[in-house]
Image (cartoon, grey):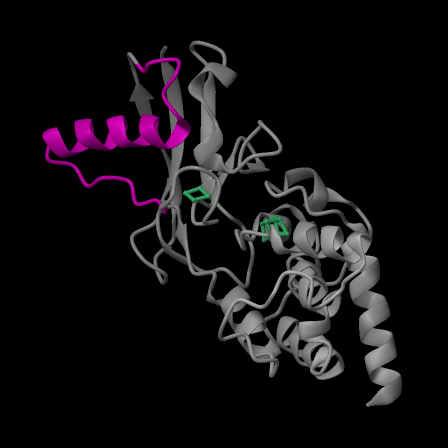
Amino acid sequence: MNFLLKIWRQKDRQSRGKLVAYEAADIPANASFLEMLDIVNERLLLRGDEPIAFDSDCREGICGTCSLTINGEAHGPDHPGAACELYMRKFRDGEAIIVEPFRVRSFPVIKDLVVDRGALDRIVQAGGFISARAGSAPEANSIPIPKHDVDLAMEAAACIGCGACAAACPNASAMLFTAAKVSHLSLLPQGEPERGTRVLKMVQAMDAEGFGNCTNTYECEAVCPAEISASFIAKLNREYAIANLHA
Ligand code: SF4
Ligand code: FES
């Protein structure tokens, strides 16, 4: 397959970036999007040109490292899935594809398509640790937890921290991410002792990092590769209101 790529190139955090056109010829239809970029980079290197910087690690939708906006959509057109799970057969032969980094003020561009998502780490860090001893595997039935809560906690824990929710949101809100991180612990007894302080500190950190607020556009849910439900944002709001009452 052949494609015309328009890729965001930016030397460093301070420089102005711009879209640069590249031809991607003879790309296997079953190549992943990141493999297609690898092929383009190999050709650039052979020509002595600077390769395109982009992030990846697991390349199987687990780590949340890949962070591309493809034709205006966070992670590209194949939802639910991370950019590394997108295949070139999803595009038309000859199609023009625009590739940009995640566009969020709180995720500054480091180089080309690589952004700094340290803001998400700082939100998690603000939540602190749990004081419940978790050093050894407990007997499976020693902490009875309702099945519904276990399932919900597991759903929330599926968040891979990619930041696509913030990138897709018109308010650059990180509330889906924060809601997932708050919820997976607040639903379990192990997270109970610090439940109130955790949500207050994480929301405070989220605001301090410059993320916007949720106005129910549901763009976050639409692009989330882990299919985190926007209903967790309602849970975050409830947790925050109750914690404020007891603060
Ligand atoms: S909630 Fe979804 S989109 Fe947001 S960081 Fe987690 S996995 Fe990524
Ligand atoms: S590279 Fe790990 S989720 Fe895409």
Pinpoint residue 210: horizontal percent, then vertical percent: 62, 69
Using the image, determine if residue 236 lies above or below residue 84: below
In this rendered view, identify the residue nearer to me: 26 or 231: 231
- Looking at the figure, which quarter contains the C terminus? bottom right
Using the image, determine if residue 131 lies above or below residue 88: below
Residue at 68% from the left image edge and 58% from the top image edge: 180
Residue at 72% from the left image edge and 63% from the top image edge: 183
Residue farthest toward the bottom in the current orientation of the protein: 247
Pinpoint residue 125: horizontal percent, then vertical percent: 53, 76
Does the magenta-highlighted stretch encompass residue 62? Answer: no
Residue at 27% from the left image edge and 31% from the top image edge: 38
**What segment is highlighted magenta in the picture?**
27-55
Using the image, determine if residue 27 lies above or below residue 101: above
Quadrant of the rendered structure where residue 222 is? top right
Q: Is residue 109 left or right of residue 190?
A: left
- Looking at the figure, which quarter contains the N terminus? top left
Q: Is residue 242 left or right of residue 222?
A: right
In this rendered view, identify the residue nearer to me: 1 or 180: 180
Residue at 58% from the left image edge and 28% from the top image edge: 77
Pinpoint residue 230: horizontal percent, then vertical percent: 77, 50
Q: How many callouts does the rendering have?
A: 0
Pinpoint residue 202: horizontal percent, then vertical percent: 65, 75
Does the magenta-highlighted stretch encompass residue 53? Answer: yes
Q: Is residue 199 left or right of residue 225?
A: right
In this rendered view, identify the residue nearer to me: 185 or 230: 185
Q: Is residue 113 left or right of residue 151?
A: left
